[in-house]
Structures are given as structure tokens and as C-alpha cells.
Image (cartoon, rainbow, N blue to C red):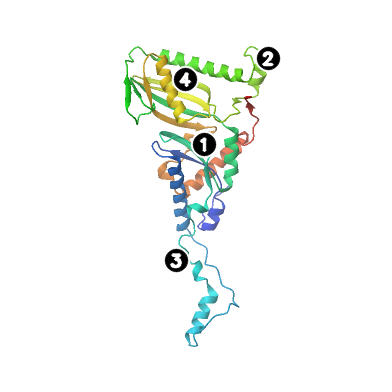
């Protein structure tokens, strides 16, 4: 379908609906990202062609001065409402005019895929949030030093030797943790792994926790090792920045050393990939409209993101 350039702000605003995929930089809060996106949208809309001021009714009584200037004032009064002019009201579009909410939040030190629902897209974002799709992270840890909150922005609390740690030991520990998390999910459902019921439960799809506060890890593996840094790829639900940082710390203790999380990056949220995320220099109206259209195609290709059967854990 051929695209048509639109220069009318009202038309653009009317079609400003859907799910937006932006790349959140590390060190920037979600609220600041939201404010920057909305400000740039309003700036772009206000630079387009604006609607004309409202017209006043023709039969409105006009108090004259009894001079020849009354006819001029009458023509002005019956043509436009000066109180509705842009010079009187200010910009037509303000951030408060646009409804926008994040599908799932990211921590201040986490970068990567961040989804927003805009205007009518809030309904879609709410459905995605209720379905709790899997998010994929690349987590980089630095061995040898531990910090107060397991993140790089606080004081170092401990130091340790890490020469005995190898990639094989980290991979073995990651596989063991993945197996224990999977076993725990079936135990919470009251199902033995060696039974037919467990097989039928696995055929239905991912087991999602009924409680939003319960983190679940579906997969964890080592993808890069270069002492003292190592990078893990993790698939999880209901995770938080603090939980992932503490996970790196606990893994280091199991390896008889200490470590802290030096980088957190969300590379995928369900089928929304980091390669489709809108970088910060693209947070302007044309880029946002194009990104909304791209994410609309992804939702059309994967309708199960909005409506899918969930296998939930019982309390």
C-alpha cells in the first residue's frame, strides 16, 4: 500500500494509536523516557498545519462605539474567535493530551526494549501486560568485586580472587539453576515431573505464575566469557532489576567468589525485538509514527500476544 505524506496535525493525531517500541538508555528512568517521547510528539504536531480558530455565530450581538470603526470590528468578530487563536491559547497539543503508559517497567540501570501503549493502544498494552510474555536479557557480571546493591553505582564491599572460575563452571551452574527453576514451577502446580500430568501441562505452553510478584526463570545460559567479565542470556517473567542483580551475586557465591552486575540489557519482549527499537535520536514524530506502524504489523503476525491461553500456577 502506497504511503501518503500528511501535513495536517489533526489527521496525524487521530492516527497516533498503538504500541511503541523504544530503546531505553541505561541511567534514564522510565518516566523521563515517557516525558521525552511525549514532548517530541507534541513538538512535531505543533509544527504541522493547525486547525483554524473557531468561528463566531453571525447573530452574536456586538456593542459598538458609534463610529466608523464599528463595521471593521463587526467583520472581525463574525469571522474568527480570537480567543481560540494559537497566539492566545498557546500550542494546540500538550503532553497531557496524549495517553501513554508503559507495558512493563525497566530499572534505571537497565537498557533495551521498552514498550509504551499510546492512546487507543492502551488496550493492547494492557492485554500484553496481563499475558505476561517472556522477556530476554543479556546480563554482564564482573567478578572480583561485590557492591552494596550488586550494581556498579555503589561502594565496593568485598574483593575476591576469581582465577579458579572457568566458563565450564559458569555454564554448569547456569544449567543447574535452570533445571531447579523448572522443577520448582511443576512443584508449585502439585505435579510430579515423571508423570503424564506433567507432560500434558508442558504441552499447553509456558507455565506462568498467578502472582505478578513471583519471578520465574525459563532459561539461563552463558554466551560470553572474558575474565573478569561474563555475560548470561536469561529468559524470565516478573523479573526486576534488583532480582537479576542479586542473581549474579548469588551465582558468584556458588562459584566461591564475588561479583556484581555491570550491565543489564533487555533484548526482546515477547516478539518485540531490540533491532526494531527506536533509538533516542529517532524519538521524533516521523520516527514514532513509523515505529507504531511496524509494531502494528508484529501484532498482526502474532495475535497470540493479545489473546492466549495461560497455564497459571495455583496459590
Q: Cα distance, mark 4 to mark 3?
A: 59 Å
Which of disc 1 and disc 3 is earlier in sequence?
3
- The residue where tag 1 is placed is 104
Up-down relation of residue 215 to residue 52 (above or below): above
184 or 306: which is nearer to us? Answer: 184
Q: Cα distance, mark 3 to mark 1?
A: 39 Å
Q: Cα distance, mark 3 to mark 2?
A: 72 Å
Which of disc 1 and disc 2 is earlier in sequence?
1
- The residue where tag 4 is placed is 221
On the image, the x and y values in percent for residue 254 come to 42, 14
Q: Residues within 10 Å of mark 2 (few under 14, many from 20)?
A: few
On the image, the x and y values in percent for residue 36 come to 43, 47
Q: Are marks 4 and 3 in contact (CB under 8 Å)?
A: no
At a point 50% along the width and 32% down the height, the residue shown is 268
Which of disc 3 and disc 4 is earlier in sequence?
3
- The residue where tag 2 is placed is 196
Up-down relation of residue 253 to residue 14 (above or below): above
147 or 106: which is nearer to us? Answer: 147
- The residue where tag 3 is placed is 87
Which of disc 4 and disc 1 is earlier in sequence?
1
- Judged from the image, the secondary structure of the residue bearing numbered disc 4 is strand
- Judged from the image, the secondary structure of the residue bearing numbered disc 1 is loop
Amino acid at each position: 500500500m502506497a504511503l501518503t505524506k500528511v501535513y495536517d496535525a489533526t489527521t496525524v493525531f487521530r492516527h497516533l494509536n498503538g504500541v511503541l517500541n523504544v530503546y531505553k538508555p541505561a541511567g534514564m528512568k522510565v518516566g523521563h523516557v515517557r516525558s521525552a517521547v511525549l514532548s517530541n510528539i507534541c513538538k512535531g504536531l505543533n509544527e504541522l498545519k493547525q486547525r483554524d480558530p473557531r468561528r463566531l455565530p453571525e447573530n452574536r450581538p456586538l456593542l459598538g462605539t458609534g463610529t466608523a470603526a464599528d463595521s471593521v470590528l463587526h467583520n472581525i468578530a463574525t469571522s474568527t474567535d480570537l480567543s481560540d487563536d494559537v497566539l492566545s491559547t498557546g500550542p494546540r497539543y500538550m503532553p497531557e493530551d496524549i495517553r501513554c503508559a508503559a507495558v512493563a517497567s525497566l530499572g534505571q540501570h537497565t537498557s533495551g526494549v521498552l514498550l509504551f501503549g499510546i492512546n487507543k493502544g492502551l488496550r493492547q498494552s494492557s492485554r500484553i501486560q496481563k499475558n505476561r510474555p517472556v522477556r530476554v536479557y543479556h546480563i554482564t557480571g564482573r567478578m572480583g568485586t561485590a557492591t552494596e546493591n550488586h550494581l556498579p553505582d555503589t561502594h565496593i564491599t568485598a574483593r575476591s580472587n576469581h582465577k579458579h572460575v572457568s566458563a565450564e563452571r559458569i555454564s554448569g551452574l547456569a544449567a543447574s539453576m535452570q533445571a531447579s527453576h523448572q522443577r520448582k514451577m511443576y512443584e508449585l502446580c502439585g505435579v510430579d515431573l515423571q508423570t503424564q500430568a506433567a507432560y500434558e501441562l508442558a504441552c499447553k505452553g509456558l507455565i506462568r505464575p498467578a502472582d505478578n510478584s513471583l519471578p520465574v526463570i525459563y532459561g539461563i545460559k552463558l554466551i560470553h566469557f572474558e575474565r573478569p567479565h561474563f555475560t548470561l542470556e536469561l529468559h524470565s517473567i516478573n523479573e526486576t532489576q534488583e532480582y537479576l542483580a542479586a542473581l549474579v551475586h548469588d551465582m558468584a557465591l556458588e562459584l566461591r567468589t564475588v561479583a556484581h552486575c555491570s550491565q543489564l540489557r533487555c533484548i526482546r519482549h515477547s516478539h518485540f525485538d531490540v533491532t526494531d527499537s527506536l533509538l533516542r535520536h529517532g524519538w521524533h514524530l516521523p520516527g514514532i509514527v513509523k515505529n507504531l506502524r511496524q509494531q502494528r504489523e508484529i501484532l498482526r503476525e502474532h495475535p497470540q500476544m493479545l489473546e492466549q491461553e495461560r497455564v497459571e500456577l495455583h496459590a
